[in-house]
Amino acid sequence: MGAEQIRRWESGALAHAVSDPFGQGPLPWLRGSENYFDDTGQVVPWYADLGRGTGGGTRTADDVHRQIKGFVSPGAAAPGEAIDFHITVDPPQQFSVDVYRIGHYGGDGAAKITTSPRLSGIVQPPPLAADRTVSCHHWWMSWRLQIPSYWSVGAYVAVLTTADGYRSHIPFTVRHDHPADLLLLLPDITWQAYNLYPEDGRTGASLYHAWDERGRLLGEEDAAVTISFDRPYAGAGLPLHVGHAYDFIRWAERYGYDLAYADARDLHAGRIDPSRYRGLVFPGHDEYWSLPMRRAAERARDCGTSLVFLSANTMYWQVGLAPSASGIPDRLLTCRKRRGPGKSALWREVDRPEQQLLGIQYAGRVPEAGPLVVRNAEHWLWDATGAADGDEIPGLVAGEADRYFPRTSLPEHDNRILLAHSPYQDSEGATRHQETSLYQAPSGALVFASGTFAWSPALDRPGHTDGRIQQATANLLDRICKRD
């Protein structure tokens, strides 16, 4: 492979990386240095190290050579159910799957739960592509993980390792329907929207990008309209922005919050009974919502279940989900954006602006991180933080920002308050404002929207933590959970 082809392959990841100012490589949850001996007797870390060359040790698989890549179906399952792994290995050789659960774990950030037996890897057929939709639904099943009844619910990552030391990753969720204080909803629909697999300069496509015949990266006008969950995630195998959810998980589990777990597709499919929870938490970038998702969130709020949105640009695009070619539900994701007949798929342009649920809505990108400026510091959210009106919390307005739109109607509420009002410069140098919102619905439910990408990283991301945001988040969740 020539240098030009490599540059093209990398360009997709680089194009997306600009929208995540907190990127720390593919493994943002990692804290510890758990090592083990590989087949050559070398001591190696469990995570893939992008910095290593080809001279030995672990190396990250890529989408061009497909040394080892895979996906799971379904993406979430309960104890007693199974998750099927579809994995390609090139050249064919043995491989193993180490399964980790994301959590605090004394600061390590993850713990190994189990390891597969040695498995025989094969070269699966190339991905199928039709009208920019890329799918690997025709791959053979490589391994079935039967989830034991004693496994904890949570966010999991499978680490795939070939005998010659190449690695990639697959995220999945273990869920159940038992009551809990808080239900954490992992934004798998938005994760898939950004997935450019395969980043090979030729085949891959997301809802943002595709390639032309010369290997150049194209924009949204030429991107996919429908994408498939039946394919690996590009690059190291983990979604863009996945770290935002993991930041919240590590922090919340450290302080003992009673958490249940599910995916956005569980919300879409009606597998969630909001009455079992005091609050639903949306911990990361959650931009793509279906109509059933929105209806479920509105019903939850109207029945007294609080909603916590810890990012920005939430519920911006309306999407549809459909079965795969083999009939498995919710494996195809469609978003027309501004192409084709009919109205745009923006919620605000189909007379359902996000602000009617969130209290604020998307305002734009933030080219350079700036401070969050505290407002209404006497409110209980800021209790014990030491924050005063006008105080600046550095770096907390970043990535993308929301604000209150005065000409857009608000949700019905008993009281409402803005807890930050932060100026920043947009890409054209104009001054804009970010805002953080909290309102109480007539049902008594609280609806909080941080209005910035940086809130979850401030909870537990090295170099980004802030004690004031940690305390404010604890104040919010404690009130929702009715802790003393």
Image: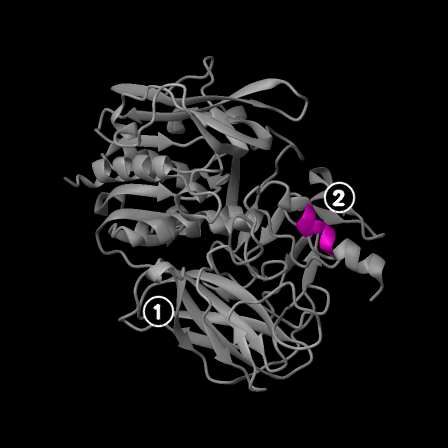
| Residue for point 22% across, 39% down | 478
Which quarter of the figure has residue 3? bottom right
Task: Judge left or right: residue 177 versus residue 235.
Answer: left
On screen, residue 381 above or below 433 = below
Horizontal and vertical percent for residue 460?
41, 48
Which quarter of the figure has residue 166? bottom right
On screen, residue 363 above or below 474 = above
Task: Judge left or right: residue 381 versus residue 374.
Answer: left
Write down the residue under mark 1.
81
- Disc number placed over residue 398 in the picture, else none: none
CB atoms at circles 1 and 2 under 8 Å apart?
Answer: no
In this view, the residue in front, 3 or 124, is 3
Query: How busy is the neighbourhood of tag 2: few (under 14 within 10 Å), some, or many (20 plus)?
Result: some
Q: Which residues are magenta?
A: 10-14
On screen, residue 171 above or below 245 = below
In this view, the residue in front, 461 or 95, is 461
Which amino acid type corresponds to the residue marked 2 in the rendered image? Answer: Leu
Write down the residue under mark 2.
218
On screen, residue 428 above or below 394 = above
Which mark sits nearer the N-terminus, 1 or 2? 1
Q: Quadrant of the N terminus?
A: bottom right
Task: Judge left or right: residue 48 versus residue 277.
Answer: right
| Residue for point 43% across, 71% down | 99
Secondary structure beneath label 2: strand
